[in-house]
Amino acid sequence: MSTAIAAVRREFTDALAEVLAENAAVCPVRRGRVARAHAAIKRHPGYNEHEFCAAVEFAFEQWETLQNAGSPASAIVRP
């Protein structure tokens, strides 16, 4: 995976994890961030379904860590 796609993937993963952590109280700004990151990852020349699925899976892992830790700032781990 190239550095450029890695950055796009990280932005998508972080945005999705943030929305998942907010749960039902998600404001339109955060949903917009996910939508923009999703569009960026899909448009990227290095995009493939495997990478996209891995980004979604990692976001859910981050969300699960947040749920178990109870402290959002200390629980997010970057690859």
Image (cartoon, rainbow, N blue to C red):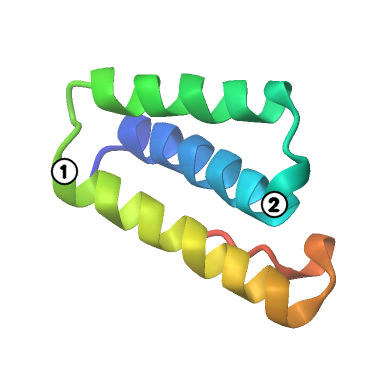
What residue is shown at x 26% (from left), y 18% (from top)? 43
- Residue found farthest to the bottom: 68
Position of 31 relative to 52 (above/below): above
Numbered mark located on residue 49 in the image: 1
Q: Nearer the viewer, residue 39 or 7?
A: 39
What residue is shown at x 61% (from left), y 28% (from top)? 31
Q: Quadrant of the N terminus?
A: top left
The secondary element bearing badge 2 is classed as helix
Residue 55 screen position, x and y as percent:
37, 51
**Left or right, 2 with reference to 32:** left
Q: Which of marks 1 and 2 is in front?
A: 2
Position of 57 relative to 12 (above/below): below
Q: Which of 62 and 19 is in front in this view?
A: 19
Residue 72 screen position, x and y as percent:
80, 62
Residue 10 screen position, x and y as percent:
48, 43
Q: Which of pointers 1 and 2 lies earlier in the amino acid sequence? A: 2
**Residue at which label 2 appears:** 23
Residue 18 screen position, x and y as percent:
66, 47
**Left or right, 14 with reference to 41:** right
